[in-house]
Amino acid sequence: MVYKALKKMEVNTKGLSQKVQSLINDKRELAFKVANLNESLAVATQSLSACQQRLEKVERNILEHRRDLTQTRQRLDMLTTETATMDQLTRQFEEIRTKMRDQEKKVSIVECEIMRLDSRNFGSQIGPQSEGLSSCERRLDRTEHQLALHDIQLAEHDIKVQMLEATSYDGTYLWKIDDWARRFQDSVSNKTPSIYSPPFFIGRFGYKVCARVYPNGDGIGKGTHVSLFFVMMRGEYDALLQWPFRQKVTFRLLDQDHQRDVTDTFRPDPKSSSFRMPTTNMNIASGCPQFILLSDLQQGGYIRNDTIFIKISVDMTGFLGP
């Protein structure tokens, strides 16, 4: 009897030892899982913090966009008031206004999206939190992509507004060229050999033209002179104008010390294709390949604050508009 009891106790002890060992293994496994969960929680917390920072950045960007939209709209309203009688500009302003309204709608949609993201409960459990973070990051990526597109559109609109503000209709244009040292180096290295001025007009519904400068020269003036040319551009009223173009053109480089301007005048050659009605966006440039020596440009008062001024004047005598 005693032997059987001892045998039974030995069996029970062995079973208990196995259970204890199993519990120890389960404890180790749970400790490992807890460690993994803590690590996941730390990563999720960092991701949440990063998402919140990105949300704040997006919100700041939206505020800046709204300010830019307001300023651009005000400028457009001012320009529309000043040029309300000009059909061509009115159409351009309306197109820009339509784009700006569309852009405002897109920004409003982005704001609503951010409000939903900001109010979203990421949950206290790791699984739902990770899914919420992943969804938040995807939406933030889309939002940042939309804002990048808005930046590009705003830049395009700003360029259009600047061009409209600078437009001249009396055949005279004062061209300010800044950052001259860099532009000269770009011309020397052939990275950007020439620069075009914004377009201007000869008459309200007349010829559309612009100027083109080669800071390091072109043709016989390359490397020794600044070359300056006149360019006929394709305009909306070309069919009503007289061709070839015959008006006298004068270039004037302004001396900012008010000592001695540099001028050159030429009359268009009626036989040159440069002054016939354009069939492409612009004709071949024509003008003064040896407008001013590079050494004279540096010695005079023509460059101040890395900026030069060139005045292009077209003689309106005898001009017959449409």
Image (cartoon, grey):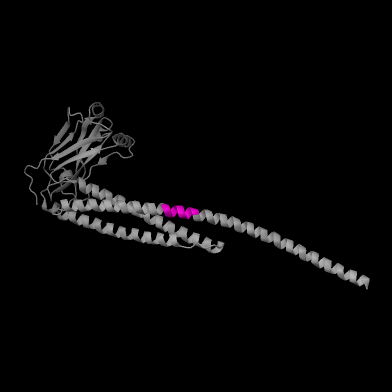
The question of residue 288 being in magenta is answered with no
Query: Residue 277: image x %, image y %?
Result: 16, 49
What residue appears at the point 80 percent right and 64 percent down from the top-left corner? Answer: 17
Find the residue positioned furthest to the bottom: 1
Q: Identify the main secondary structure in magenta.
A: helix
Rendered residue at 28%/53% (across/down): 70
Indicate whether 21 appears above or below 85. below
The residue lying toward the viewer, choosing from 76 and 218, is: 76
> Where residue 75 sits: x, y (%)?
23, 50
- Residue at the left extreme, as displayed: 318
Q: Position of residue 35 (x, y in %)?
A: 63, 56
Pick whichever, 305 or 40, lies toward us: 40
Q: How many marks?
A: 0
Identify which residue, 297 or 27, lies in the foreground. Answer: 27
- Residue at screen point 49% across, 60% down: 134
Residue 143 against residue 266 in the figure, above or below: below
**Which quarter of the picture shows residue 146?**
bottom left
Image quadrant for the N terminus? bottom right
Side (left or right) of 104 relative to 42: left
17 lies left or right of 103: right
Could you tell me if residue 282 is visible in this image? no
Using the rendered image of the protein, determine whether residue 168 is visible from the camera's viewpoint: yes
Given residues 13 and 213, the one toward you in this image is: 13
Q: Position of residue 139 (x, y in %)?
A: 43, 60
The residue stretch that appears in magenta: 49-56
Q: Quadrant of residue 193?
A: top left
Residue at 28%, 31% in the rendered image: 223
